[in-house]
């Protein structure tokens, strides 16, 4: 008899898990609290581990068709006024041992959504709590409805309702001290010239402008919280407050953008246990990573693929979930710490510290930076232990 998986959250991680579990022989039901399971048009980095995981799900070609995945990326590190600190040509595909891409989220989310199918997704269903009885789990929603299954996956983000019930004494997410404005825009790629990306650094300021498709650009502006006027959360207002400090390229790209979002970046400590019985966590619900790792979406996708592999066939659910934790938790915990350390360096507001940071960057040869990027991404790539045949075809 086909077993049923209940998945809370129709984001990238939840849909990856749904697709992997279906390919592993499970019936899937995905529940999304929003009225429509869509992603806003912001960007996501897809390192080789993410591409391999998407290939295991059968959607890599579809995602890459709408992404920016060059063989080489020419990028510049600049001061906010446009002064070039470093120019680097990264031999992406050859050096990393696999393709790497930048995509707008709708390209990734849309490919996963098309593969899963909207008939498997119930919108306007906000999870409230769950209960376990024997080998079964029941999920209750705020609208009073119930759903029963053999597995419950909490893919409901950093403020996860499922995580809160599994760990009722855990403190809520805390501020990282960083806020961000993100945007996506089309038809202004000419402002980048031959560059694939521009990385700006200033006192408490970090910004990236990157190609994300044939016509699209993704950009973000990240600020130390103390640089933001009290109460300012309106994205256009915050952008206007900072733009005069940037060069003409930044102003040209961001001023053409009308798809903006303000975020305060939150952080949580690692937890020792992700699962209980037939209930587990995935993606940001299990290991919310700061964007400085470049691995948030990738790790959620790999989580989903790993669940599918370990729960294939007649696998015992609690045993498989323990194996899933043992495989995924150490690596994601390491990445969480890495993201925190990088964020601390990048949000510095001390002029002396920032000057030292720039001096160090200037002194590092371009080929050494390329080797470092290769090393980081190859290390990240080792977390994909999956053959597409293992989760079905």
Image: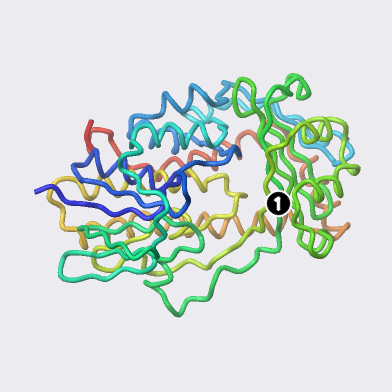
Question: Could you tell me which residue is drawn at 76 percent across and 30 percent down?
Answer: 87
Outermost residue toward the left? Answer: 1
**SS of the residue under disc 1:** strand
* The C terminus: image quadrant: top left
Instruction: Report the colour scheme.
Output: rainbow
Question: In the figure, is residue 227 to the left or right of 53?
Answer: right
Question: In the figure, is residue 5 to the left or right of 186?
Answer: left
Q: Position of residue 159 (x, y in %)?
A: 50, 63
Q: Nearer the viewer, residue 108 or 148?
A: 148
Res 77 → quadrant: top right
Q: Position of residue 358 (x, y in %)?
A: 82, 46
Question: Could you tell me which residue is drawn at 53 percent across and 28 percent down?
Answer: 95
Question: In the figure, is residue 112 to the left or right of 80?
Answer: left
Outermost residue toward the front? Answer: 143
The residue where tag 1 is placed is 180
Q: Nearer the viewer, residue 75 or 149?
A: 149
Counting the numbered discs, the total is 1
Local crowd at mark 1 within 10 Å, few (<14), some, or many (≥20)? Answer: many
Res 150 → quadrant: bottom left
Q: Position of residue 217 (x, y in %)?
A: 67, 30
Outermost residue toward the bottom? Answer: 169
Relative height, residue 80 to residue 288 (above, below)? above
Question: Could you tell me which residue is drawn at 71 percent across and 39 percent down?
Answer: 208
Q: Position of residue 357 (x, y in %)?
A: 79, 50
């Amino acid at each position: 008899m086909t077993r049923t998986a209940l998945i809370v959250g129709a984001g990238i991680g939840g849909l990856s898990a749904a697709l992997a579990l279906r390919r592993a022989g499970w019936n899937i039901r995905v529940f999304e609290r929003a009225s429509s399971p869509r992603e806003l048009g912001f960007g996501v980095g897809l390192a080789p581990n993410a591409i391999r995981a998407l290939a295991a799900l059968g959607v890599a070609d579809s995602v890459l068709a709408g992404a920016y995945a060059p063989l080489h990326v020419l990028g510049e590190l600049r001061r906010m006024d446009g002064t070039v600190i470093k120019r680097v040509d990264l031999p992406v595909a050859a050096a990393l041992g696999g393709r790497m891409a930048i995509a707008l989220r709708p390209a990734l989310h849309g490919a996963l959504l098309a593969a899963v199918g909207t008939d498997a997704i119930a919108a306007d269903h906000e999870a409230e709590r769950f209960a376990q009885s024997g080998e079964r789990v029941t999920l209750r929603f705020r609208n009073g409805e119930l759903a029963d299954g053999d597995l419950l996956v909490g893919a409901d983000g950093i403020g996860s309702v499922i995580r809160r019930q599994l760990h009722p004494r855990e403190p809520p997410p805390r501020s990282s001290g960083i806020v961000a404005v993100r945007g996506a825009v089309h038809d202004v790629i000419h402002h980048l010239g031959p560059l694939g990306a521009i990385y700006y650094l200033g006192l408490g300021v970090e910004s990236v402008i990157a190609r994300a498709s044939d016509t699209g650009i993704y950009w973000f502006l990240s600020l130390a919280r103390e640089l933001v006027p009290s109460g300012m959360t309106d994205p256009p207002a915050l952008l206007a407050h900072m733009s005069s400090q940037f060069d003409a390229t930044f102003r040209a790209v961001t001023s053409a953008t009308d798809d903006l979002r303000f975020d305060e970046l939150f952080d949580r400590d690692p937890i020792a246990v992700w699962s209980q019985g037939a209930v587990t966590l995935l993606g940001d619900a299990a290991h919310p990573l700061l964007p400085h790792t470049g691995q948030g979406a990738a790790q959620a996708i790999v989580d989903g693929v790993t669940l599918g592999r370990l729960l294939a066939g007649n696998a015992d659910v609690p045993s498989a979930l323990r194996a899933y934790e043992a495989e995924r938790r150490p690596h994601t915990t390491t990445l969480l710490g890495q993201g925190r350390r990088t964020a601390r360096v990048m949000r510095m507001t001390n002029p002396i510290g920032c000057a030292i940071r720039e001096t160090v960057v200037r002194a590092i040869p371009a080929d050494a930076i390329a080797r470092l990027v290769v090393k980081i991404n190859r290390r990240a790539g080792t977390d994909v232990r999956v053959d597409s045949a293992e989760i079905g075809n």
